[in-house]
Amino acid sequence: MALSNHPKGWNEIKTNDSWALFKIMGEFVNGFERMSLIGPCVSVFGSARTKPGEKYYELAVNVAKKIAESGYGVITGGGPGIMEAGNKGANAAGGTSVGLNIDLPFEQHDNPFIDPDKSLDFDYFFVRKVMFVKYSQGFVVMPGGFGTLDELFEAMTLIQTHKIQNFPIILVGTEFWGGLFDWIKNTMLEAGNISPKDLDLIKLVDTEDEVVEIINAFYKGHTLSPNF
């Protein structure tokens, strides 16, 4: 439908867009104020569809627990599946457990393992993504779907283009991620679309100990702070 024939009319659409700016600003302000108080954290991503008892759910619990025991907080998307597992592991270890929730028509609902004062709700994906990147000292990426890939490649692009400081990006599950990494190396790199050093942006592992070793080695001697 042409905008000129839109039932709301062009002027009303423009007015609604202008008012939306205030809601967007409000989400940024609330997010910045609350997230700036949480301390060093690592974000854990993965599928909302992964069930308790499944291999990668239980591995995510152990990964998050190990991260919390090493002194970092854990940030997830606040929902079920791998997000729940990440908050569960952090909670079990007595660590900071943060949930950045998004209003979705399916899949998303708050999990019970988020610290009561560290649950934030967002309507806009792009605001939520800023919070993940700005206040994370590392990304741990468990098996997931399109949303997980979105967060992964967003972080890689921002680091590659020097828009944010470098931080560890760790893919957990070589069986799941190996094919993607091979495609990046054998297709993207061979085509000249990325540089060889870009392959160093990500690490593939299978255990919680490897995750923590990579994060601790990266930050040895560093002062942890939000990624500006």
Image (cartoon, rainbow, N blue to C red):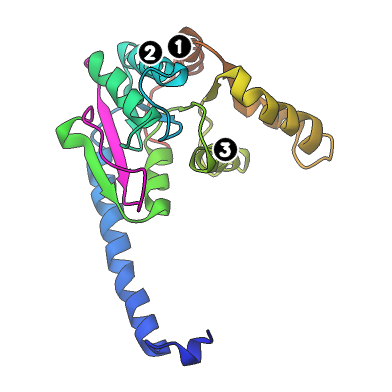
- Within 10 Å of the Cα at label 3, are there few (<14), some (14-19), or many (20+) other Cα atoms? some
Secondary structure state at the residue bearing disc 2: helix
Tell me the residue that label 2 is attached to: 62
Q: Earlier in the sequence, mark 1 or mark 3?
A: 3
Label at residue 151: none
- Within 10 Å of the Cα at label 2, are there few (<14), some (14-19), or many (20+) other Cα atoms? many
Q: Tags 1 and 3 in contact by the CB under 8 Å rule? A: no
Left or right? Give the position of 126 relative to 80. Answer: right
CA distance for labels 1 and 3: 24 Å
Q: Tags 1 and 2 in contact by the CB under 8 Å rule? A: yes
Q: Amino acid at mark 2?
A: Asn
Tell me the residue that label 1 is attached to: 208
Left or right? Give the position of 84 relative to 46. Answer: left
Q: Quadrant of residue 195?
A: top right
Secondary structure state at the residue bearing disc 1: helix
Tell me the residue that label 3 is attached to: 159
